[in-house]
Amino acid sequence: MSSTKSLPISTLVRQLRQDLNLSQEKFAAKLGVSFKTVNRWERGHTLPSPMALKRIEDLSYEMGDSGRVLLKQYCPEGELDV
């Protein structure tokens, strides 16, 4: 069992978007979803679909070390899942 506490998906989405220096609208366009969808994720009202989670994971890896650190904070076991 890992001693690292996982962050909620809303925190991961918000932090990733901010680290990429994107507005919710631009982040949504990059993921192929609507602004409302990203807004709901960040407020914790809904969870990303498996396809969106895969794209979020890909974007995190594209960021390099900082993205990997963020993923590790969200999912210490190494698998991004809802």
Image (cartoon, rainbow, N blue to C red):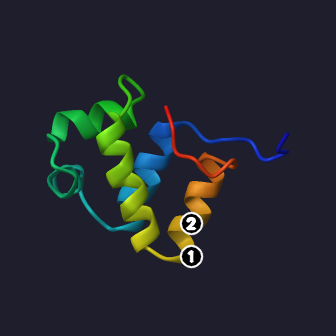
User: Residue 69: where, in percent of width, then height?
Assistant: 61, 64
Q: Do we see residue 43 in this rendering?
A: yes
- Label 1 neighbour load within 10 Å: few <14, some 14-19, many 20+: few
User: Residue 73: where, in percent of width, then height?
Assistant: 64, 52
State which quadrant residue 57 falls in. Answer: bottom left
Residue shown at 69% from the left, 47% from the top: 77
Which residue has dot 2 on it?
Answer: 68
Image marks 2 and 1: residues in contact by CB distance under 8 Å: yes
Residue shown at 39% from the left, 31% from the top: 43
Q: CA distance from mark 2 to mark 1?
A: 5 Å
- The tag on residue 47 is none
Q: Which secondary structure, mark 1?
A: helix
User: Residue 71: where, in percent of width, then height?
Assistant: 56, 56
Amino acid under disc 2 = Arg
Asked if residue 78 is positioned above or below residue 82 in the image, the reply reads below
Q: Do we see residue 18 in this rendering?
A: no
Give the side of residue 69 with respect to residue 58, left or right: right
Residue shown at 32% from the left, 67% from the top: 21
Residue shown at 69% from the left, 49% from the top: 76
Amino acid under disc 1 = Asp
User: Residue 59: where, in percent of width, then height?
Assistant: 36, 63
- Label 2 neighbour load within 10 Å: few <14, some 14-19, many 20+: some
Which residue has dot 1 on it?
Answer: 65
Q: Nearer the viewer, residue 28 or 75?
A: 75
State which quadrant residue 23 falls in. Answer: bottom left
Give the side of residue 24 with respect to residue 45, left or right: left
Give the side of residue 47 with respect to residue 6, left or right: left
The N terminus lies in quadrant: top right
Asked if residue 46 is positioned above or below residue 58 in the image, the reply reads above
